[in-house]
Image: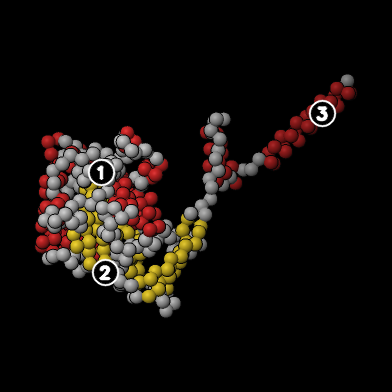
Amino acid sequence: MKKAYRIGILAIVTLFLAVSFNNCAQPKFSELDQKSLSSLSTDLNQTSDEPVIPEVPKKIVTKSKVLDIKESSKIDVLFVIDNSGSMAYEQKNMGERFASFFSKIDMLKWRIGIVTTDAAPSAAELKDGKLIRVSNLGGRRWLDSELDSRTSAEINFKATIQRSENGSGNEEGIRAAHRAIERDAANDINVGFFRSDAALAVIVISDDDESPNDAAEKISGYKKSDVYKSWNYSKNLVQTVATRWPGKAFLINAIVVQSGDMACLKTKENDNSNESYGTEYEEGAKLTGGVIGSVCANDYSEQLGDIGTGVAEAVKSVSLECVPIDGDGDGVLDLEIRNSGNQLLNNYSIKGSLITFSDQLTTGMTTIRYNCYQ
């Protein structure tokens, strides 16, 4: 009897100690921080076949760029115009809308070329990044500020851009720009258009988004590859320009169906709706500090004027490899710019990866150091 009594007492004491230990070990709810709650919630919602993948911390890298400033008043402008059937309405009056653009770049040494969004591999004209022959100029493939008066340039530009054709339904404005650059580099049809010492602006006008042509591999002599699809991304076009021309000021501008503008998406003459939001072109504009306009505007004058102003500013701009960050958290971007006399420069603004100076940089070496995420 006594033995059973002792066992009972021992069991009660053991149970009491176990409960006390658990209560001591368990943190109070008020002591759980937000991170713990978040982790707890994640663990509860996680199924056995969905393992938790830890987030890889972003790596901060230091970049530097040295500019040899010689002349900074040159600008090359590549218009990439959607020539698919759905753009017939915009094509009718497009040429009338460009006078404001020319007026903004009148004081620069400009050069203007035009390609279509039909980037399908082909030897035919109006495709695959080939600069279109300018009307009334004997087969020349671009306009130049030194050729004639601005009025004549506007007339020739209008005659060239205002055409009637039915290009590919796969609008590939970014790829067409890539191909235009490659054709220049390969001493092909476009050779001589892009100047190494000029700023560069790409202006895409389309009622659709970048639409890779998955059927392209069926064309004789062509095989689709990873390179093909990589050329459909704005970020890769930025990298292509930065690799070929380090330090070149570069803008992507987009006149498109703006994201969320359902009225523009659904409205078109004869109930023929626009095709898609131009998100990839918008991404390029955001990345480079370019302008985003609406393809549904009755008159492109204002937004082309804004683009023209941005293009004019580009001759005082420098493109960086990536967007500068505030790595040390002091509220100031990790960015330092010094001229050839080692003087610190502060006369600039920054938008995305584009630095624009309030005045043109003086001739000589300018050094830029900055941090960004890799």
Q: Give the distance between the C-alpha atoms of the residues marked 2 and 3, in whole angstroms.
A: 96 Å
What number is the disc on residue 249?
Answer: none
Residue bearing mark 1: 123
The kind of residue on which mark 1 rests is Ala
Q: Is residue 301 visible?
A: no
Disc 1 is placed on an element classified as loop
Q: Is residue 18 visible?
A: yes
The kind of residue on which mark 3 rests is Ile
Residue lying at 18% horizontally and 65% vertically, measured from the top left: 145
Residue bearing mark 3: 9
Label 2: how many residues lie within 10 Å, few (<14), some (14-19) or many (20+)? some
Q: Is residue 331 left or right of residue 219?
A: right
Q: Nearer the viewer, mark 2 or mark 3?
A: 2
Residue lying at 11% horizontally and 49% vertically, measured from the top left: 93
Disc 3 is placed on an element classified as helix
For the image, the number of numbered tags is 3
Residue 366 screen position, x and y as percent: 40, 72
Residue lying at 69% horizontally and 41% vertically, measured from the top left: 25
Residue bearing mark 2: 73
- Quadrant into which the N terminus falls: top right
The kind of residue on which mark 2 rests is Ser
Give the color scheme: rainbow, by chain, secondary structure or one colour.
secondary structure
Q: Are marks 1 and 3 in contact (CB under 8 Å)?
A: no
Badge 2 or badge 3: first in the primary sequence: 3
Q: Give the distance between the C-alpha atoms of the residues marked 1 and 3, in whole angstroms.
A: 97 Å
Badge 1 or badge 2: first in the primary sequence: 2
